[in-house]
Amino acid sequence: MSTNKRGIELLQDPALNKSTAYTETEKLAFGIVGLVPDVTETEDLQLNRVMMQLGHKNTDLDRYIYLINLLDHNETLFYRTVMSDPARFLPIVYDPTIGEACLKFGHIYRQTRGMYLSITRRGKVKEVLKNWPQRDVRFICVTDGGRILGLGDLGANGAGIPIGKLQLYTACAGVPPQYLLPMYLDAGTNNEQYLHDPLYLGLRRSRPSTEELYSFVDEFVEAIQEVFPKCCIHFEDWTGVDAVHLLERYRNKYCVYNDDVQGTAGIVLAGMINAAKLKGTKLSNEKYLFLGAGSAGIGLANLLCSALVEEGLTLKQAQEKVYMFDINGLLEQTRKDLVDFQKPYAHQHAPTRDFVAAIESIKPTTIIGVSTVGGAFTQKIIESMARINERPVVLALSNPTERAECTPEQAYTWSKGKAIYAAGVQFPPVHLNGRTFLPGQANNFYIFPAIGMAVFATQASRVTDQMFIEAARAVADQVPLDLLNLGMLYPLQSNILETEIQTAARVAKLVFNSGLARVERPNDMLAFIREHVYAPEYKDQTRASRTA
Ligand code: NAI
């Protein structure tokens, strides 16, 4: 961190600004006497002021705008605020508030953040990337706005997603913010409402052909290798088919991953591991039936199969344990409408469009809802699962809340307290017949920031499925038995930084064991990760400038 700046220039740099916390020595050294109130406040006092001001905001969107404004002026205080109470602030800086912020992105826009790269710059991508002021970029989170959360094609309004997602690398796992670059690739939008909105901030054209889009992404990915050679590219919120195809296109060649495909799969796998633990069995003894065979479903099925192979099954045996059901019924071998990546899960079975009939015939131990259809797990479905299984596992992962395939209350009530349940969103505890159940939230933010920290610390050259499986195991292992017995499959969010540090250490160990690290192996992996963790604390800038 350079402290060559002085006076008003120093106060206007959000990475350096300490606002009312400058000491007398710093004020004299940097020529800021008289430019700030003549006090020296502690960070805790500043945090109290932030909390008080937040208390006057009426909606989460107002709180989001306030916090982003704080980030634009004082990065340290922003992260100190978010990291002081992650369970409270993560839903404001990220999902679900971020969805509303994206819908209104062009309207609430105040200041630029990250980069905007238009398809009209093809042939000049490298030059545009060189405009970014930091030379050592370690993570780019990139979207084309194609499928933002469950909200569809939001075009340039989707730019809020990479911004929010990268903040979680820092807030949840301590990746230092100066290495992070949010990126929006603008290839147009098919969202008519935005195309006609005068405040829309993207290209006013419809989306190009897949071929044209992929050639633009090719140029972008190749340019990154040259401009930011240590950078890992995190793909986020592309349409399902693009997500799967672009991941396949680059994963063996460059350091890339897709959080919707792999991160989601990782966190759901963690829940499955703990569900198996609760039942006293292992993953390979279970049978899985998915409702939904899109990018989330396929990503999860693939990662699950890799985990089953690690338990000793062949890939074919693993795939035979996974059945899928989509809008046209059960995936089976006579179906003519399947895409390449769905075919491994189309088994020999009579065609059916009746999910209950499929349950009765296949006898799954676990049903996984990734269908986007709220209420799709009906009473009949849960009762059927409870009849077949002593402890049916019900994962209702679609979001937002109204899209969850069933609520925890429904799952526990209809199964007479037998179900092991998790959702994609946070639900409150359920009290039933004198028992308390804690439904867990399969939220990616337990996984991708930890993977990010491990990649950052080890300078890993690739991101592999095995890293997500190890992260899933590490997350699962950190749920204490008393919580697990209440049905809670995930660690508590209040302690997320420590959980992710432990997870990152395990993933980092795997990176070294796999020969993918580009730094020397440390003796103590946990201490090594801790050395890399960003702390939202002001530095003595007179000392920083002397040692710079
Ligand atoms: P997608 O659009 O790629 O796939 C949806 C799938 O559901 C398709 O296979 C479709 O045929 C099927 N489907 C739709 N209506 C159906 C019906 N009535 N009956 C049976 N199948 C039906 O969507 P994607 O990206 O796979 O996401 C699916 C859901 O998973 C979304 O709601 C998303 O929010 C959620 N999700 C949850 C995550 C979590 O961590 N909890 C992370 C990522 C996605």
Image: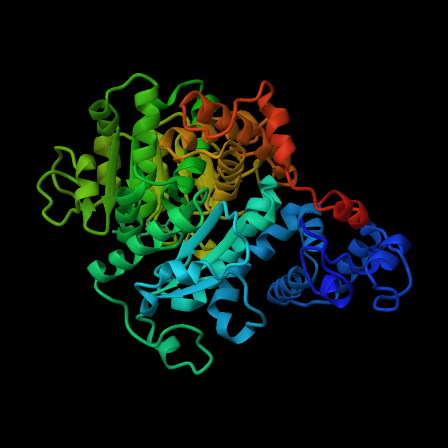
Q: Is residue 259 left or right of residue 205?
A: right
Q: Nearer the viewer, residue 181 or 239?
A: 181
Relative height, residue 156 to residue 522 (above, below): below
**Residue 383 x %, y %:** 36, 37
Q: Is residue 21 left or right of residue 354?
A: right
The residue sitting at 30% across, 22% down in the picture is: 309
The residue sitting at 39% across, 31% down in the picture is: 392
Image quarter of residue 491: top right
Relative height, residue 25 to residue 64 (above, below): above
Q: Nearer the viewer, residue 51 or 209?
A: 209
Image quarter of residue 341: top left
Q: Is residue 235 visible?
A: no
Q: How is the image coloured?
A: rainbow
Q: Nearer the viewer, residue 379 or 142?
A: 142
Q: Nearer the viewer, residue 522 or 204?
A: 522
Q: Is residue 383 visible?
A: yes
**Residue 60 x %, y %:** 62, 63
Q: How many marks?
A: 0
**Residue 420 x %, y %:** 46, 33
**Residue 65 x %, y %:** 62, 66
The residue sitting at 64% across, 52% down in the picture is: 89
Q: Classify the position of the C terminus by image quarter.
A: top right
